[in-house]
Image: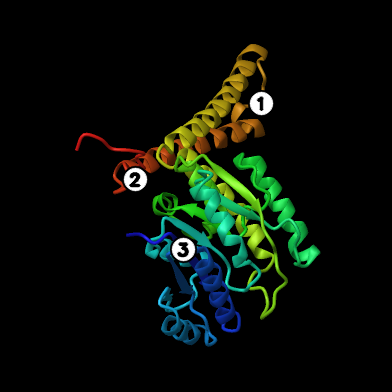
Amino acid sequence: MHPDLSIVIPLYNEEESLPELVEWIDRVCTTQGYRYEVVMVDDGSTDRSWEVVRSLTDRFSTVRGIRFQRNYGKSPALYVGFKAAEGNVVITMDADLQDSPDEIPELYSMIVNDGYDLVSGWKKVRYDNAVTKNLPSKLYNGVNRMITGIKLHDMNCGLKAYRRKVIKSIEVYGEMHRFIPVLAKQAGFKKIGEKVVQHRARKYGSSKFGWERFINGFLDLLTIQFTSRFGKKPMHFFGVLGALTFLTGFVFVALLAIDKLRLGDQVAVTNKPAFFISLTSMIMGTLFFLTGFLAELVVRNAADRNDYITEEQIGW
């Protein structure tokens, strides 16, 4: 039987906070009577985090550990954590004690009793630096809401709850952990909710993220939007773009030729800057079209070209 709950914790250099975090989780889950497991993924820590995880697996039969050879990032850590998790409900949280395990029962209830596929935490009151984290985070989430249509205030919150089928149906790669709600929506999971959660001041260590995460996050957002719309039909993007670009150049060349014939312009068409701009446009259009054609060939021969998620099968 699957446990009621899996708690996936990616970690990197958090040796001080791990014992307190696991003890807190155990206290909450034992009080609630959950059959649970804790999956801790050490993302290549350089401190004693893995030794601490080892000691915790000896103390708690519910704790499991996975260790990376080197630091790969949070998305790969979540990917292997999701792959290993067996709970009917999966909750993710950060290892730095800024996420409170006391939120677990209500998050669990929203999945089991309220029927949500995914519930994302909203740290409405934050204890981060207002300039380096709070303001950029608000701008970042505002852009996310506008582009994706998912009305979450804190899409990148590490404290989330999932129905088991959700985490088994999506692939988190690169830096896509910021956009798991988007991945879930694209996979057909429509009931995505939000819960205001407590954000606690950092007790140990320092943040592992800097300003570059917002630039990378915006680029990843563009990537995920493009691949979701055109990943299996790239010609629909490159073909249309190429055809429009080529047609624009062709029309301008035609107009130059008509002016030459109608007005008897003494200047050769090939000596006009507009001719070269039009010719460049036609060449770019052809290249866009060929890019779409080649991408279409790649997609049609890809092993996962028919890798779709089915809601139900019957009649076996």
| Residue 176: % across, % down | 52, 56
Q: Against 263, is 280 above or below?
A: below
In the rendered structure, find residue 267 and report the number of the disc placed on it.
1
**Residue flagged by tag 3: what amino acid is it?**
Tyr
Vertical placement of residue 106 versus 69, above or below: above
SS assignment at label 1 = loop
Direction from residue 291 to residue 181 in the image, left or right: right
**Tag of residue 257:** none
For label 2, the crowd category at 10 Å Cα-Cα, with few meaning under 14, some 14 to 19 and many 20 or more, is: some
Q: Residue at x 57, y 72 (%)?
A: 95
Neighbour class for label 1 at 10 Å: few (<14), some, many (≥20)?
few
Q: Which mark is residue 34?
A: 3
Residue sitting at 73 percent across and 56 percent down?
A: 124
Element assignment for label 3: loop
Q: What residue does disc 2 label?
A: 298
How far apart are labels 1 and 2 at the CA level?
46 Å
**Sequence-earlier tag: 1 or 2:** 1
Q: Amino acid at mark 2?
A: Val
In the rendered image, the quadrant that contains the C terminus is top left
Image quarter of the N terminus: bottom left
Q: Position of residue 263 (x, y in %)?
A: 67, 14
Q: How many marks?
A: 3
Task: Please name the amino acid that badge 1 sits on.
Answer: Val
Query: Residue 103, position in %: x, y?
Result: 61, 61
Residue 127 vs residue 297, the one in the foreground: 127
In-front residue for pair 61/174: 61
